[in-house]
Image (spheres, helix red, strand yellow):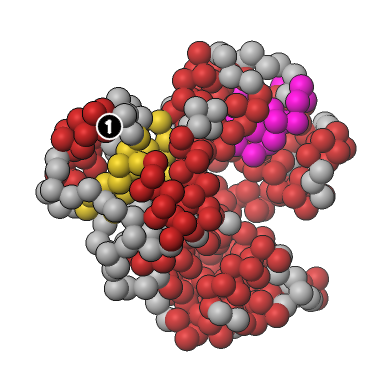
Amino acid sequence: MKKLSVLFIGLLAVLTASAGDIKFVTGLTWKQIKEKAAREKKMIFFDAYATWCGPCKYLESSVYTDDAVAKFYNDNFINVKFDMEEGEGVTLSETFAITSYPTLMFFAADGKMVHKYIGAMEAPEFISLGRLARDPATQYYTLKEKVKSGKATDEDFSHWISNAQDLDDEDRVEISQQFLQTRPDLFASKDLLLAVMSYARLNSPTQLEQLLNARAKIKTMLEWDDQHLDAALYRKTFLYALYQSGDDLNHEKFMGIIKKYYPSRVIYAEHELSLVAAIVGEDADKMKTVYHSMLAGSKKLPIEQSSQLYLEYLESLEDTVHESLIPLLASYKFTSAEKGKEGWLYLMQTISYSQLNEVAKAKEAALKAYNHPCVPQEYKDILKSSYEL
């Protein structure tokens, strides 16, 4: 969901930057800014942006200009922003390993990074982000150290790893696996179970079996419906099989695990493995082949599942893949079992057109998706706000 909402924010962002009501410090080096923070005993808010970034422009024009945002950030932070592709920003980009924009970072008065977030948001959420960054109980890097030291509660762990996933923290797998070694009972608390089901990578087949054999218990503890539960359990199984298959993505080993633990998703998993291999190999032609196979081949998937695989890997696809899907979706043949599922095709069309900046056609497809009963309300809310439906 976050990926999709950020996509539409980027698409519809106002292209004229505003000076904003947040007072950003200018004319100082990063070293001088840290010295200023130390003198004033004040935290630093750091906006790492790029001039071409749509969500960055949205923050500049529609969030930083909000009165409540400006008051909160001016009262509580020294605010700075750097173009990460110009001047000192290039060096700082390497220092902080910036790979996505906007990256929003928060530093304590002593210059230590304590919190981080990637992406744009609305004004109320941006104020909430600042509050999280000021509270040691919710600061990302403070929680990370607690998890690493073994002093974290299950609630701490759940909160940290959800953010670690969004930030693509390279340490998250090793740290979470070490933490889970101290928690052999995955059902010890709702917070722990939620973290395991939603984010943590499983260590062993024993853990996978523990989850697969406790569907009713998971549904009760997390209050999930059957569809949510099935999607989450498949994802745990797929990721376990993927990492067990090694760096070469051994097909036989991977499929053996899927057939043993999730036989109902064999064809889906096979398509997904092929797609992952194409993405890893940066092979756009193979990506096209995989999507064509799932939409029209002998191992065709239901349109809802094809849509799920499109959304799951959206950010990793080449524009030529989106372009190739447009005629295929236009001529798609529904089976009798897919009656009432047309909304998923309209959603795929919306995204493929938006990826190619064909806004009028994207809005036309978005309206069809929005009005179709099979599309989940959470997607409809994004479509409504993004296309003013």
User: Which residue shows up at 43% across the image and 48% down it?
Assistant: 72
Q: Is residue 109 left or right of residue 289?
A: left
Residue 191: x and y in percent read 70, 30
Question: How many marks do you count on the picture?
Answer: 1
**Which segment did they paint magenta?**
187-206
Residue 162: x and y in percent read 56, 38
121 and 352: which is toward the camera:
121
Q: Is residue 212 left or right of residue 2?
A: right
- Residue 217 visible (yes or no): yes
Q: Is residue 48 left or right of residue 370?
A: left
User: Which residue shows up at 57% across the image and 51% down it?
Assistant: 272
Q: In which quadrant is the C terminus drawn?
A: bottom right
Residue 103, above or below 206: below
Residue 346, above or below 231: below
Among the 4 quarters of the image, the one containing residue 315: bottom left
User: Which residue shows up at 62% across the image and 31% down it?
Assistant: 158
Sort mark 1 into few (<14), some (14-19) or many (20+) by Cα contacts within 10 Å: few
242 and 80: which is toward the camera:
80
Q: In which quadrant is the N terminus drawn?
A: bottom right
What amino acid does circle 1 point to?
Glu
Residue 180: x and y in percent read 62, 20
Residue at the disc numbered 1: 40
Q: Secondary structure at mark 1?
A: helix
Residue 281: x and y in percent read 37, 49
Residue 189 is one of the magenta-drawn residues: yes
User: Which residue shows up at 33% across the image and 33% down it?
Assistant: 42
